[in-house]
Image (cartoon, rainbow, N blue to C red):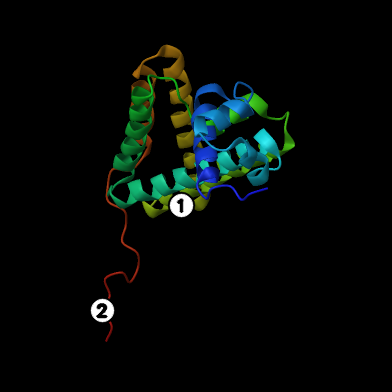
Amino acid sequence: MARPKSDSREKILASAHRLLCRQGYRGTGLAQIVEEADAPRGSVYYLFPGGKEEIAVEAVHLAAVNSVRHIEATRASHPTARAWVSAMADHCSRHLMETGFSEGLPITTVTLDSVPGSDALAAACRDAYRTLVASLAETLEHYGITPAEDARSLAMLLLGALEGSMVLARADQSLTPCRLILQQILPLFPDHPAPEKPGADSQPH
């Protein structure tokens, strides 16, 4: 078999990501993923021998990686935990608006649609959520929330609030659930700058 074009893998994963956000795992067919990706049909099983399940597993992993990048980038540009949480919520709201309330988060849709039916997808979703919670907790510790157990618990609450608000917003076809939930959780986060790390301003002698 001729080697597929180098961008076929990225196209297939991007197509799977979009379709999983809109339709979930069971509602998305392999043929639809390939058609929307505009990738050679023969490349699918060469790149993904496990078929649709393998594509979905990798799409969930990629979604987690991209979410962590967004968490870190947003942290870098917001001085307080409260501002950071607001920015994260705004990002979710913009995504809903831009997609006409048709897309959620692929980890959410795949979890609801295929866990525990598929061991591979269950493991992928579990690992993705653990990755997100760890990144959120690390950020909260950066903003001075300690001990680590408190940061982790608050990270889980934040993730649940953001994902839950998106599900409710899709059902309601409005941003009202996002706005109301954000109002309730914002006071839980400090509104003062992150503490300076010990020795950050020290000068060598």
Compute the Cα span from label 2 to label 1.
Answer: 27 Å
Q: Is residue 3 visible?
A: yes
Three-letter code, disc 1: Glu
Q: Is residue 153 visible?
A: no
Quarter of image, res 172: top left
Which residue is tagged 1? 138
Seen as rendered, the residue at the extreme front is 2
Dot 2: element: loop
Residue 179 position within the rendered picture, expressed as x and y whole percent measured from the top left: 33, 23
Q: Residue at x 72, y 32 (%)?
A: 118
Residue 111 position within the rendered picture, expressed as x and y whole percent measured from the top left: 61, 30
Q: Circle 1: is it few (<14), some (14-19), or many (20+) Cα within 10 Å?
A: some
Three-letter code, disc 2: Gln
Q: Residue at x 35, y 27 (%)?
A: 93
Instruction: State which tag comes first along the sequence, 2 or 1.
Output: 1
Depth check, front residue: 188 or 105: 105
Seen as rendered, the residue at the extreme bottom is 205
Query: In the image, is residue 11 above or below residue 79?
Result: above
Dot 1: element: helix
Which residue is tagged 2? 203
Q: Residue at x 52, y 48 (%)?
A: 134
Indicate left or right for 132 with 48 as reference: left
Residue 30 position within the rendered picture, expressed as x and y whole percent measured from the top left: 63, 29
Q: Residue at x 47, y 40 (%)?
A: 154
